[in-house]
Image (cartoon, rainbow, N blue to C red):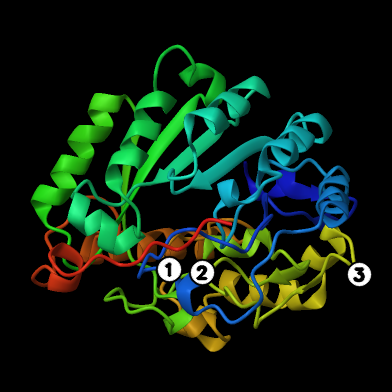
Amino acid sequence: MIFRQRVQDGGEYPRMVSIETTSRCNAACPFCPYNFKARDKFHMDQDLFEKIVEDCRAFPLEEIEPFLNGEPFVDPRIIGRLQHIRSRLPKTRLGLYSNGYGLVPKRIDELASIGGVDRLTISLNTLDPVRYKNIMGFKLERTLDNMKYLVDPVRRSKVAPKIQFRMVRMEDSTLEEQDLFVDYCESMGVEPFIVGQFNYKGDIPSAFPVPSYGCEHITRLDILSDGKVTLCCQDHEGEYTWGNVREQSVLEVYRGNTAKKYREYHRTGRRKEIEPCGDCNLFWPNLEGMGVAETVKTACAAAWYFAKHRPNGRRPPSRDPDPALSGGPAAEPVPET
């Protein structure tokens, strides 16, 4: 959707709202900041959740995701929350991310019974059992059993019309590992998506440089489980907050001076002049809200970045496999709550 269609009552509104219904996760992925996250880990209270959803009815929201820095299926209320979104925002696309371990057959059936979601992304990451155990903290067999149940034609269309399996391509992910992942996805009839590691504003090691162009995350709103609106998913602690939806509406936060400042810097080629964006390598470009010249400049810069650095898709490893992930002792799984 082009930018001018996201202006209502004299102001811009977000293309997407992400709601962290829980800040807890059952995995232990080294490419995610969850394991050293300092803030309290808890489920969002229902009153706050429903208030956010009602706020989103004030404008024609394109997409909503009840997910941010936790695992949705650790949230005991997730099915009811999805159903609530469907009833209150019937025209809004509903997306969901999960690592798939807690998406057991019972949960899959519950998801199908409420009409499912529009897009479901499963963070699978590898099909090597030892490596999976060391990366995720889980046994691969259970997750693959869940995925087999998920894509069965009996229920698949009821769960989501679009299912994507995601692989975070680490610096030591071999071509064989990547090809095996793609082959598996094709055999399951789902879309494979391979993407490189983000650096979470410098908190996680990543070889990709910081892009010069603006980031697409300036046109969305990311809400943490306590109601604080964080800069984006990379700002996992909410250090660079735009406001709090306990005190303001979703639109008030998005149209506030802090949010406007970030959009202005990104849309005028000054991403590296504002913290923490000057240290963050999130590479998806923003192509909205700019004049023709700046839009063309951004598109060219993004095309060059993707051609040179290949941040998504198949790519040879930049170093040898990490023994701690491929053959070392398995990480202890994080207890489910």
Figure disc tally? 3
Question: The disc labelled 2 sits on which kind of residue?
Answer: Gly
Name the mark on residue 232: none
Per the image, the residue denoted by label 3 is 247
Lower position in the chain sequence, tag 1 or tag 3: 1
Question: The disc labelled 3 sits on which kind of residue?
Answer: Glu
Q: Residue at x 20, y 69 (%)?
A: 329
Task: Say whether residue 206 is left or right of residue 63.
Answer: left
Task: Say whether residue 150 is left or right of residue 293.
Answer: left
Residue 73 x %, y %: 57, 46
Q: Quadrant of residue 2?
A: top right
Looking at this view, is 317 or 97 the one in front? Answer: 97
Looking at this view, is 183 or 34 the one in front? Answer: 34
Q: Residue at x 52, y 79 (%)?
A: 277
Quadrant occupied by the C terminus: bottom right
Q: Residue at x 18, y 50 (%)?
A: 128
Packing grade of label 3 (10 A; few <14, some 14-19, many >=20) is: few
Per the image, the residue denoted by label 1 is 32
Q: Residue at x 80, y 77 (%)?
A: 257
Residue 72 x %, y %: 59, 49
Task: Say whether residue 124 is left or right of residue 295.
Answer: left
Q: Secondary structure at mark 1?
A: loop
Residue 264 x %, y %: 66, 74
Task: Say whether residue 53 is left or right of residue 158.
Answer: right
